[in-house]
Image (cartoon, rainbow, N blue to C red):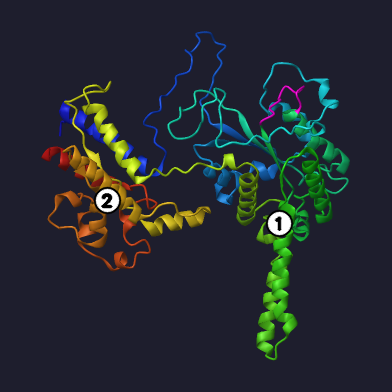
């Protein structure tokens, strides 16, 4: 089929309206944003690029941080990236095998330079915690860019250049705690001095990395699972780390953080408390005793399983005695977010939700951009087709959220209200509307007419016209026929939407 130029134009407008309709429900309105262009590209070979970016959360650490953005391991940085999506860029600067002394040698290539002077000797004579004013303690209702305008918040400009370093996480100690004689071992006094040095680079006026508004968050090393480490040592792939040495490093982190006036996440204590609390709970039935030998055997087995797991209970949070597993990463993520929210509430991500009345008004304004003769975009001959958001599969949303460690953030009952608002705006302006929400609902719940071409596609007519036993027991109530994850359309969902759009265009 050859589409006319008019039909192509209508399809383009329909696609644009679909984009705005769908995103207005869940995300901040960007209707008033202008995409600021960067300066013209220089013709010489020596080009300088300014990449549009968000404000930055920098994570500086060892291998726990390096693999912290691995989604297959539920990395804590992967969680943080999702938590701050479209609000801050999470920058991973983890270096496997590094202690703080090694990190000190490369830190000048990790932190952004804020001034052109060379490294100043003033760093050795001035530390910010010796001053009455504490950097990194700025507060306020929002994050501000260099021009003073609020960003990223509703009705703000998309960035045209890299933003500033809002938060720096310093997370070392797992290698520093290695036993004396191991390659990563770092004397405790040197470890403390290195941590102070990292802070001075950001908070000392003489530093080329001086950034007094950058917030600093320390993280203690995690507790060490010695039995797990010893098991790995037999294969020759693991240095010896004793939990008492890790504890000593954790205490140094807390001491230095308190000294410089920065908050910290005590991951070591959080893990120790959970491991030993589980052990104590498991021991209670054994202390109470039992007269049944079979029950006694089960209780003893339970005690051993909880008390030792495989390796004293530390395998609840660790892969190999050092590195975090998914549960350990989730624990760390929760602790980091709690500490950030407590100390810097202005960094809490803004809600993407748009109130229903605002959503309705925004759609009305979009129409008026094309219909109002006084508008810069006035185009009376342009055809407009509205599309409602699709139905949402609540159970699919819950399943995806549960597997990725965040709370469900959408409900089909709420989506219906926004779909109704789309139809209301369309009626107000006497415009056609594609009701994909109702189409999916009718098909899922079996109320769609088998004679209606609007609710079928060539590839799924048989699938949807003939109920099957499998469909009746679907854990996702049938929404998986049209949705990838409870929200986004799969191939069948896109085919259905395409057919509905073409049908509406032909009718109009």
Where's residue 354, x and y in %?
39, 43
Point out the tag, 2 or 1, that comes first from the N-terminus: 1
Where's residue 65, x and y in %?
66, 43
Q: Mark 1 falls on what kind of element?
A: helix
At 62% from the left and 56% from the top, the residue drawn is 327
- Label for residue 437? 2
Where's residue 40, x and y in %?
47, 12
Whether label 2 touches label 1, CB < 8 Å: no
In the image: residue 361, left or right of residue 64: left
Q: Can residue 420 be seen at all in this image of the molecule?
A: yes
- The part of the chain drawn in magenta is 204-213
In the image: residue 244, left or right of residue 409: right
- Label for residue 270? 1
Q: Residue furthest bottom?
A: 291
In which quadrant of the rendered view does residue 382 lie?
top left
Looking at the image, is 297 positioned above or below residue 441? below
Decide: few, some or many residues near mark 1? Use Cα within 10 Å; few <14, some 14-19, many ≥20: some
Q: Can residue 390 be seen at all in this image of the molecule?
A: no
Where's residue 191, x and y in %?
83, 40
The residue nearer to you, when weighing 80 against 46, is: 80
At 30% from the left and 64% from the top, the residue drawn is 471
The N terminus is located in which quarter? top left
In the image: residue 276, left or right of residue 70: right
The residue nearer to you, when weighing 353 against 13, is: 353
At 28% from the left and 45% from the top, the residue drawn is 494
The residue nearer to you, when weighing 460 against 33, is: 33
């Amino acid at each position: 089929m050859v589409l006319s130029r008019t039909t192509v134009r209508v399809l383009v407008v329909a696609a644009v309206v679909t984009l705005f309709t769908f995103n207005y429900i869940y995300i901040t309105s960007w209707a008033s944003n202008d995409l600021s262009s960067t300066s013209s590209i220089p013709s010489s070979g020596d080009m300088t690029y300014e990449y549009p970016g968000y404000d930055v959360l920098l994570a500086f650490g060892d291998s726990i941080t390096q693999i912290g953005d691995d989604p297959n391991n539920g990395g804590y940085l992967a969680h943080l990236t999702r938590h701050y999506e479209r609000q801050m860029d999470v920058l991973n600067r983890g270096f496997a095998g590094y202690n703080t002394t090694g990190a000190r040698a490369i830190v000048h290539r990790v932190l952004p330079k804020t001034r052109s002077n060379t490294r100043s000797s003033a760093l050795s004579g001035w530390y910010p915690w010796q001053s009455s004013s504490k950097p990194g303690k700025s507060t306020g209702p929002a994050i501000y860019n260099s021009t003073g305008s609020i960003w990223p918040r509703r009705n703000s400009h998309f960035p045209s250049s890299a933003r500033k370093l809002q938060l720096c996480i310093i997370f070392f100690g797992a290698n520093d705690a290695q036993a004396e004689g191991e390659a990563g071992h770092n004397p405790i006094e040197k470890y403390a001095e290195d941590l102070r040095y990292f802070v001075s680079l950001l908070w000392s006026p003489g530093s080329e990395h001086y950034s007094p508004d950058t917030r600093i968050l320390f993280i203690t090393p995690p507790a060490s699972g010695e039995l797990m480490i010893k098991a790995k040592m037999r294969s020759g792939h693991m240095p010896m780390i004793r939990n008492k040495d890790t504890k000593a490093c954790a205490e140094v982190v807390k001491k230095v953080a308190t000294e410089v006036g920065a908050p910290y996440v005590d991951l070591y204590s959080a893990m120790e408390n959970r491991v030993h609390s589980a052990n104590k709970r498991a021991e209670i039935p054994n202390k109470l005793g039992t007269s049944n030998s079979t029950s006694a055997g089960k209780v003893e087995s339970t005690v051993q399983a909880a008390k030792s797991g495989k390796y004293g209970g530390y395998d609840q949070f660790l892969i190999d005695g050092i590195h975090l597993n998914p549960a350990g990463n989730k624990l760390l993520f929760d602790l980091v977010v709690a500490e950030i929210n407590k100390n810097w509430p202005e960094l809490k991500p803004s809600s993407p939700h748009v109130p229903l009345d605002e959503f309705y008004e925004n759609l009305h304004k979009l129409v008026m951009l094309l219909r109002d003769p006084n508008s810069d975009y006035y185009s009376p001959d342009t055809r407009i087709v509205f599309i409602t958001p699709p139905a949402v599969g609540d159970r699919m949303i819950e399943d995806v959220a549960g597997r990725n460690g965040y709370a469900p953030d959408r409900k089909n009952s709420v989506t219906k209200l926004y779909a109704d608002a789309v139809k209301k705006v369309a009626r107000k302006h006497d415009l056609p509307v594609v009701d994909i929400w109702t189409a999916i609902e009718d098909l899922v719940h079996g109320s769609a007419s088998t004679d209606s071409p609007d609710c079928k596609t060539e590839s799924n007519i048989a699938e949807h016209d003939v109920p099957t036993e499998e469909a009746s027991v679907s854990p996702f109530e049938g929404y998986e026929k049209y949705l990838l994850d409870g929200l986004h359309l799969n191939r069948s969902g896109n085919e259905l939407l395409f057919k509905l759009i073409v049908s509406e265009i032909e009718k109009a």
